[in-house]
Image (spheres, coloured by chain):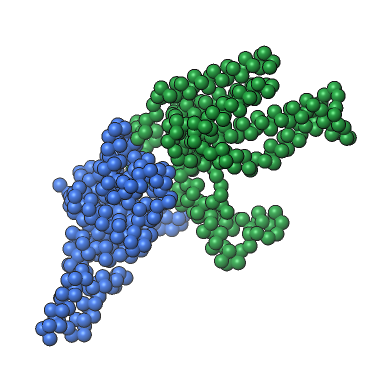
Chain colours: A green, B blue
Amino acid sequence: MLKDITLGQYFPGNSIAHRLDPRTKILLVTLYIIALFSAKGWMGYAVMAVTLAACVKVSHVGLRALVRGLKPLVFIIAFTGILNMFFTPDTHYLWEWGILRVSVKGIENALFMVIRIMLLVMGTFLMTYTTSPIRLTDGLESLLNPLKKIHVPVHELAMMMAIALRFIPTLIEETDKIMSAQKARGADFDSGNIFQKAKALVPILVPLFISAFRRADELATAMECRCYHGGEGRTKLHVLKYQRRDYVALAGGAVILALVVVLRRLGA
Amino acid sequence: MDMIETKALEFAYPAEEGEKPVLALRGVDTAIEKGSFVVVLGHNGSGKSTFAKSLNAILLPCGGKVYVEGMDTQDEACLLEIRRRVGMVFQNPDNQIVANVVEEDVAFAPENLGVASEEIRRRVDDALAAVDMTAFMTHAPHLLSGGQKQRVAIAGVIAMEPECIVLDEATAMLDPIGRQEVLSAVHKLNREKDITVVLITHHMNEAEEADRVIVMDDGRIALDGTPKEVFTQVEPLRTMGLTVPDTVDLLDRLRKDGLDVPLDALTVDECAAAITAALAKN
């Protein structure tokens, strides 16, 4: 059951979207999010939807995979939609019942809200689907590099993130093993109310934590043995380098953001 | 010059309050020759792992000295250079792999050493080829078998271009096939790249092909010599709680039953030949 967790899942591939510099992709997603929140009216959202569709097309990531990513968020999306639909104040209503009032504006708001969340989630997922976690961390480290001047431990943070990502599968495997060991001795994780279930997890967490600390200790020794001494003077196997396609993609992103802002001004 | 030299090496782990620290190493004097393949044997608690960790300044001696190609491990200025020259592979492969792509992990050490990117690329390719793992370059380490992970860990050490590799019970968690993979990779490195190997283990059979065997007991070197010299000392080995290799055990029993066979036929073939010869004489 733990194997189903798709944390920052990555689909290997060789499309343009895969080959873009991770920094470009992080910047593009930032632009995309800004544009999404500046979008107003049907035209604005249409531009965003077309942008996303075009990105999906060039990334060769199946639409189905993207939609699957939305699944865990169905509740939040529905909740936001319903809230907007019933509680948007307006001058006249199509339907009223107690405090629940539906107006044309409400329906429109609800639709926009739902579309916005869906586009937001799908856009960010597209980035994690096409960028391996290690490239993503490399990109973040490189983008945040200027913060080193104000003593932000950028390298250390990136290293921690990379190691955390590396150990997720190992720790999941370990959790499964501990659960099996506890089940073999009669532990019951599936029945009882939520409090009983939470309590049943304690005997899993304690050994998991102890073993995680032991692993951390051994890993630190192994890293020292391989001459790790912080980020100073460190080089990289894969050096990040902006290509022409990165500049093109960034320019495209900027144009779309400008377009959305202009559309908002025009009130279209 | 010797690769590593220890002089009256003593080490004690910090003790709990109110307890006296117990010496894990009590005066180890030895020298490991360049290019040799040395196996260090001993039961649990004999001090063999402590000895291993003293060889590249992970543990610093409480008494005595350790020299790596003449550099004192207590000299902070030499620390990185010592660790580059003496690489170490540990028991649990999962806990020494840093990155989630094989090639990135192998690149970790040269990255730390500030090697230029193209040179890192070359070293990674060489190191993976040396342990026969080139085909797995872009794989995720957690999907590999134990033997494969351990070979990746070895590649990660070779990428530093060390003079010596210390394997601290690196085969203990592996199945027989994985163990064989790792051992043949290490033997190949010793033969072809002339890398000094110090293999810490409690499997007697891994010592058969070594140049030299050191048996540790209670923080001291108990026996030291070629595999033949060491393994024919059946009684001292048994009193130290170590089993002798199966072949020697068989020959020892045959001798006790009155068959005239030599004790020093270590490999299965030699052993078989010795027994056939003795039986033919009868």
Above/below status of A146 relative to B26:
above
Above/below status of B82 relative to B198:
above
Identify the residue shown where x is 27% and y is 57%: B183
Residue A19, position as x, y percentages in the image = 43, 31
> Can residue A268 be seen in the rendering of this structure?
yes
Furthest toward the right, the residue is A98
- B196 and A96: which is toward the camera: A96
Identify the residue shown where x is 45% and y is 26%: A145
- A131 and B123: which is toward the camera: A131
Above/below status of B207 relative to B62:
below
For the N terminus of chain A, the image quarter is bottom right
> Can residue B233 be seen in the rendering of this structure?
no
Location of residue B255 (image quadrant): bottom left
- Left or right relative to A250: residue A98: right
Residue B258, position as x, y percentages in the image = 18, 85
- Left or right relative to A206: residue A245: left
- A178 and B51: which is toward the camera: A178
Label tally: 0
Residue B85, position as x, y percentages in the image = 25, 43
Furthest toward the top, the residue is A266
Residue A115, position as x, y percentages in the image = 66, 31
Identify the residue shown where x is 22% and y is 57%: B38
For the C terminus of chain A, the image quarter is top right
- Left or right relative to B280: residue A31: right
- Left or right relative to B221: residue B105: right
Identify the residue shown where x is 49% and y is 43%: A164
- B240 and A203: which is toward the camera: A203
Furthest toward the left, the residue is B281
